[in-house]
Amino acid sequence: MNINLRIRLSAMMFLQFFVWGAWYGQMSKYMFTQLNATGTQVGSAYAAFSIAMIAAPFFIGMIADRYFAAQKVLSVLNLLGAGLLFWLTQIGNADNFY
């Protein structure tokens, strides 16, 4: 692997995990202050995200490895994730957020 490609992939992975860390740690504050959520609702939202993060690689990995190039799958999933995060900020109810 040449150095240019290695640097670009490293930057992509850094930005991907940077975004996850930026919103995931602040989600409970957002839910408590903006959505007036209860502790149970916040815990349920975190649990749902955690379960999805465990289960998704199995399904996406099987599909991506067999039928698509990994970089195309990553780009589409990152764009979908960005859209979903934007959509989550438009929700005004904690139950709908969950």
Image (spheres, helix red, strand yellow):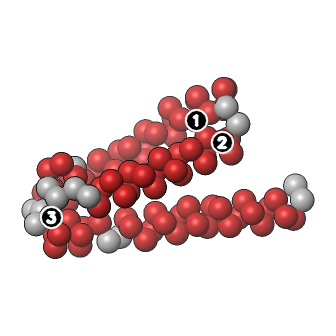
Q: Quadrant of residue 16?
A: bottom right
- Tell me which numbered mark, 2 or 3, is placed earlier along the sequence: 3
- Residue farthest toward the top in the current orientation of the protein: 67
**Residue 22: horizontal and vertical position, in percent?**
43, 71
Residue type indicated by callout 3: Leu
Query: Label 1: few (<14), some or many (≥20) within 10 Å?
Result: few
Is label 2 in contact with label 3 (beta carbons under 8 Å)?
A: no
- Tell me which amino acid carries mark 2: Lys
- Label placed on residue 72: 2
Question: Relative to residue 32, is residue 51 depicted above or below?
Answer: above
Q: Residue at x 45, y 68 (%)?
A: 21
Q: Position of residue 36 (x, y in %)?
A: 10, 66
Query: Can the viewer see residue 39 in this picture?
Result: no
Q: Secondary structure at mark 2?
A: helix
Is residue 37 toward the left or the right of residue 4 in the image? left
Residue ID at (14%, 55%)? 93
Residue located 17% across and 69% down the image = 34
**Residue 48 numbered tag:** none
Does residue 20 show up? yes
Mark 1, residue position: 61
Q: Nearer the viewer, mark 2 or mark 1?
A: 2
Answer left or right for 9 relative to 4: left
Q: Residue at x 72, y 59 (%)?
A: 9
89 to the left or right of 38:
right
Q: Out of 46 and 36, give the one closest to the viewer.
A: 36
Report the Cα–Cα distance between label 2 and label 1. Answer: 13 Å
Q: Which residue is mark 3?
A: 35
Q: Please state if 52 lies on the left or on the right of 4 as rendered.
A: left
